[in-house]
Image (spheres, grey):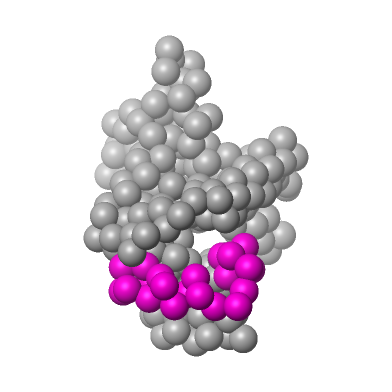
Amino acid sequence: MLIAQQWRRQVASLVGWSVTLFTTTLLTLLAVKSLLTGPSLGQLTLLIEQLPPALRAYMGVTPGEVTVNTWVISLVFRTIAPLVLTVYTALAALSVLTRDMDAGVADFLLALPLRRERLLLSRFLVAVLNIAVLHGALLLSVFLGTRMVGYEPRWREYALMVLNSYLVQAALLSLVLLITVFVTDYTQGLFVALGLSLGLYFLSLAIEPGTKLAGLRWLSVFTYSRPNEVMRTGGIPPGDAAVLLISFVCLLAAAVFLFNSKQIST
């Protein structure tokens, strides 16, 4: 019942986010076809040559080797999808507890004849499932988009890239929940959740591998997003998948423990 109630409250928003992600991805791939077949290709190549090496490496683009699959990785799986999904994940984490705490229904929630962990986990499960739905929309848009521009989609690799992205967002969801579990003001929680989530995303972009600060990149879950590796090897690096799964479970367990043990005042 708790799961159904929570999902009904969010289904309209979920549809809107799914349509946005689907449409944006589709339009991006149609624009890519125009770039690769039109007179702008030379300017695009020049632009790629001027990008910082770290950004080129992150996006997976190399001058002279620009293909549809390259841009599926760089624009969709490295830029558009992470940004849309990260904002949604931050908001989804706030919907687990903070939004209702801010609305003044904390006393009602905590007075329900349920164990606290069941309340938390049922709401968390809805967020996890909603993020899965968004990733389904992403996979469908990439598959249809590559077909529409006249290229044969690499179904297996695209599906694994989506799975990799889902693991990243699931780990991020647990982290944001842990940080915001005691934030009872929604506006404050919004700044914290979005600041943390987008900060980790841009951290993975800003620090170049091989520099003194390179070790800091491993603190960001986005460092374990490896669409380039998936496209090249046909699989998600097992070590990265393990780190994301362990992070997901441990951070969620910590959030449940703290929620159970701390007194929440409203």
Question: 199 or 18: which is nearer to us?
Answer: 199
Tally the numbered discs. Answer: 0
The answer to whether residue 100 shows anywhere in this view is yes
Q: Residue at x 41, y 53 (%)?
A: 182
The boundaries of the magenta stretch are 100-121
Residue 85 appearing in the image:
no
Relative to 24, is 108 above or below?
A: below
Q: Nearer the viewer, residue 24 or 181?
A: 181
Q: Position of residue 232 (x, y in %)?
A: 66, 42
Q: Is residue 216 above or below residue 200?
A: above
Tell me the quarter of the picture where residue 211 sits. Answer: top left
Which residue is outermost to the top? 212
From the viewer's perspective, tell me whether residue 72 is left or right of residue 194. right
Q: Give residue 202's position: percent from left, percent from top.
A: 36, 39
Residue furthest left in the image: 187
Q: Quadrant of the N terminus?
A: bottom right
Q: Position of residue 165 (x, y in %)?
A: 57, 54
Q: Quadrant of the C terminus?
A: bottom left
Residue at horizontal 73%, vertical 46%?
Answer: 235
Corner quadrant of residue 243: top right
- Out of 20 and 216, give the one closest to the viewer: 216
Percent of width and height locating residue 42 = 31, 44
Q: Judge whether residue 102 is colored magenta.
A: yes
Whether 232 is among the magenta residues is no
